[in-house]
Image (spheres, rainbow, N blue to C red):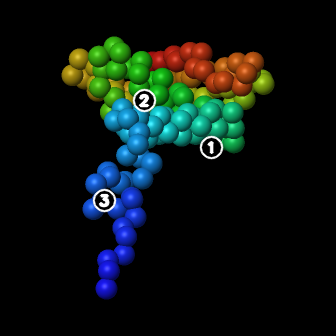
Amino acid sequence: MTDAPQSSGSPSSGSKGGGWLSDLPEWARWAIPVMLVFLGIGLVATFLRYTGGASSSDPDAQVQSLCLTAVQDDLEARGNTVEDLPLFSDVQQVDDAEYRTQGSVSYEEDGESQERTVRCVVRVDEDGTMTVASVRFGG
């Protein structure tokens, strides 16, 4: 019996094998997957931006979230340690472009525990983006 001829793509015939990926330059072997990952992230970010994500369906929750972040950032910028973030009361929609809410916050300032009321105003831009307009601490 005679041996059957081997195909030219087999490893024993002396060619590299590995398919089309082995024909690509080394830089393309890692660059293409990286570009695909960034493309996927970009598509997801674009989808969330134009659909508003899950938070746009509940403006009250979005207002509370923005205010919590603003209060924490404000206190930490002053060198204070936040102990308990406010549980904001009901969000009041003043008009189509403004929301207000209030609560109380506990924090440590110069080693002493403080508790203050905090009021937060959020404005809605023409494109529908919500931004914190003000955070005010009471007595």
In the rendered image, residue 2, in percent from the top left (x then y), is placed at: 32, 80
* Foreground tag (1 vs 2): 1
Residue at point 42% right, 29% down? Answer: 105
Apparent side of residue 96 relative to residue 2 in the rendered image (left or right): right
On the rendered image, what quadrant is the N terminus found in?
A: bottom left
Question: Which residue is identified by label 3?
Answer: 13
**Mark 1 or mark 3: whose residue is earlier in sequence:** 3
Q: Amino acid at mark 3?
A: Ser
Q: Residues within 10 Å of mark 2 (few under 14, many from 20)?
A: many
Residue at point 38% right, 35% down? Answer: 25
Q: Amino acid at mark 1?
A: Ala
- Between the C-alphas of marks 3 and 2, the distance is 75 Å
User: Disc 2 on helix, strand or loop?
Assistant: strand
Q: Which residue is the extreme one toward the right?
A: 96
Snapshot quadrant of residue 122: top right
Instruction: Name the residue nearer the viewer: 70 or 116.
Output: 70
**Quick check: can you spot residue 72?**
yes
Instruction: Name the residue nearer the viewer: 51 or 99.
Output: 51
- Between the C-alphas of marks 1 and 2, the distance is 27 Å
Q: Which residue is the extreme one toward the left?
A: 111
Q: Which mark is residue 54?
A: 1
- Between the C-alphas of marks 1 and 3, the distance is 57 Å
Question: Which residue is identified by label 2?
Answer: 105
